[in-house]
Image: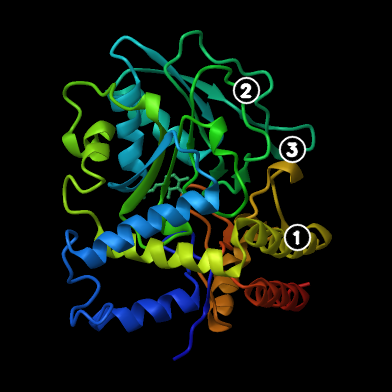
Amino acid sequence: MKRVYNFYAGPCTLPLEVMEEAQRDFLDYASTGMGVIEISHRSQEFKHIAEDSEALLRELLHIPDNYRVLFEQGGGRGQFAALPLNLLKEDGVCDYFVTGHWSNCAQKECNERYGKGVVHECTFLNEKGLYAVDFSKMTVTEGADYAYTCLNETVNGIETAHHLPDTGDVPLVADMSSDILTRPIDVKKFGVIFFGLQKNVGPSGMTITIIRDDLIGHARKYTPSVLDYSILCKHGSMFNTPCTFAWYMAYLNFKWIKSIGGISELEKRNIKKSDLFYNYVDKSDFYISKIAKDCRSRVNCVFSLKDESLNDEFLSLAKASGLVGLKGHKVLGGMRASMYNAMPYEGVAALVDFMQDFASKHA
Ligand SMILES: *Cc1c(COP(=O)(O)O)cnc(C)c1O
């Protein structure tokens, strides 16, 4: 078996240890004589998976007691609808801090279907012609039901986790689909945090929502039951049959994170990997990053070749060298190397070596 370095943005590479453990459990989980995807979500065995995964996530993120953790379906986009349905009053207002593709999709879902989301365009081209984000001039609408932000724009490669917008008493909702568990966060600063599993945690299809108690119980009457936070809470995220396999994979991943030293260790590794990558891009005259240094994502490294006519050749030679998934998102073009928690330093080093080699052949 040959495993490549997988730079896809999601679904994405997972730790080899986690994949191997899942393989062992696939046919016979905990000596039940049944595979892990064959056991009932009501069984004792699955109950342990459900309880332990929540306990581990609470420990890793230091989630305070007044927050609930929900394991849901419908991916990230499911939450784009669930949020206004649960938090935005019929005649209410909310604010969207738009920094890139995904926060823009979220505001559209709200504005085209559910109510008034004021759009604040926060990404602009700075004096050097680079994409930069500035929240400092943005103010939330008085009496807004929530303010929304995406801490890491997966498509654009823009990360803003280190300078959050100031929303005062208005609850801040954050899409952390692609940066959850890659750096420490202070959960208390948020009303709601949600993330799809497929960018750092496990397979696609499941979303985890971390929500402050007082924000539960205000859903509109016609909210689909499967998106209603209070119904999901009441049923321990088992109102309908949950994505048991995705949930189990999240559990294995949380155990792995704990075993290697938790989020602070992962942050160190992610800084080391992204520094290696951007330092090379910055000193090369063959590749460019169009994003200001203080907004560059550590996990979705977006870059381009100065000569874009070489894109196809770059991608096919990379693939032949075992470096897969480097093509940028279709709305943006260019290249993107996603280096989430499970991408080893050696993978990024191999990518940089390849880029150097490719550049010298075309100089
Ligand atoms: C991938 C992604 C989404 C969309 O997730 P789906 O599960 O495909 O709906 C939303 N937000 C961010 C930041 C993402 O990276």
Task: State the residue position of label 1.
Answer: 275
Q: Amino acid at mark 2?
A: Asp
Question: Label 3, label 1: how many angstroms apart (C-alpha)?
Answer: 22 Å
The residue at the point 39 percent across, 52 percent down is: 54
Q: Amino acid at mark 3?
A: Gly
Labelled disc at residue 129:
3
Q: Nearer the viewer, residue 101 or 230?
A: 230
Disc 3 is placed on an element classified as loop
The residue at the point 44 percent across, 91 percent down is: 1
Mark 1 surroundings within 10 Å by alpha-carbon count, few (fewer than 14), some (14 through 19), many (20 or more): few
| Precedes in sequence: disc 2 or disc 1 | 2
**Of labels 2 and 1, the one closer to you:** 2
Q: Are marks 2 and 1 in contact (CB under 8 Å)?
A: no
Q: Nearer the viewer, residue 183 or 58?
A: 58
Residue 116, image quadrant: top left
Question: Label 2, label 3: how many angstroms apart (C-alpha)?
Answer: 26 Å
**Of labels 3 and 1, the one closer to you:** 1
The residue at the point 34 percent across, 56 percent down is: 51
Q: Is residue 180 visible?
A: no
Q: Determine whether 51 is above or below 98 in the image.
A: below
Q: Determine whether 44 is above or below 329 in the image.
A: below
Q: Determine whether 269 is above or below 207 in the image.
A: below
Report x, y in % for residue 184: 62, 48
Labelled disc at residue 166:
2
Disc 1 is placed on an element classified as helix
Q: Amino acid at mark 1?
A: Asp
